[in-house]
Image (cartoon, rainbow, N blue to C red):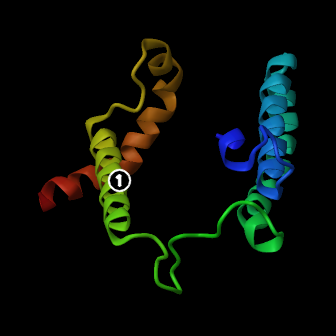
Amino acid sequence: MGQTTWGAWWVWDARLTSELILFFLYLGFMALQAAIDDPRRADRAGALIALVGVVNVPIIYFSVRWWNTLHQGASVSMTKAPSMAAIMLVGMLVMALAAWMYAIAQRCRGRAASSSNARKIASGWRKWWRLRYDWDCRALEQLV
């Protein structure tokens, strides 16, 4: 897609470069977690890399405003009228609402962990999660 749009496979654009840095941080996080045998030490080292990645996220978001880049600005804003076609805006909002409704339905049906290994690992926290968030599903059932 970059080749057809920009005439090159890679452009040193601010957003693309900061995304690449975040991708390398993600790869480093996974490699570091796998390389350290002690879980406590691995978690501490991974947390440090995750903090650097979190700092990079606002840079990625605001890179379009801060630097002259190839990417367009936001098409939908809270302060001004949307710059996209009305039919596309309606479709985007309908799909966002459908995604939220699907996520709520899945959570209420209890399909957080689908495989047996994940269920074995997650059995401890799921008990706490269900106690804490059961009221959510009950409230939704009363509304429907």
Please tell me which residue is depicted at 81% across the width and 55% down the height of the picture.
Answer: 56
Please tell me which residue is depicted at 81% across the width and 41% down the height of the picture.
Answer: 10
Q: Position of residue 141 (x, y in %)?
A: 16, 53
Tell me the SS state at disc 1: helix
Please tell me which residue is depicted at 49% across the width and 13% down the height of the picture.
Answer: 117
- The quadrant in which the N terminus is found is top right
Observer-nearest of 126 and 113: 113
Q: Position of residue 38 (x, y in %)?
A: 84, 20
- The quadrant in which the C terminus is found is bottom left
Q: Quadrant of residue 33?
A: top right
Name the residue beneath numbered marker 1.
Answer: 100
Q: Position of residue 98 (x, y in %)?
A: 29, 52
Q: Is residue 18 above or below residue 94?
A: above
Q: Is residue 114 above or below residue 111?
A: above
Q: How many numbered marks have been drawn onto this rendered protein structure? A: 1
Observer-nearest of 137 and 73: 73
- 106 vs 31, left or right, is left
Please tell me which residue is depicted at 75% across the width and 73% down the height of the picture.
Answer: 65
- 13 vs 127, left or right, is right
Observer-nearest of 8 and 17: 8
Residue that sits furthest to the top in the current view: 116
Q: Residues within 10 Å of mark 1 (few under 14, many from 20)?
A: few
- 103 vs 122, left or right, is left
Q: Position of residue 75 (x, y in %)?
A: 53, 70
At label 1, which amino acid type do we have? Trp
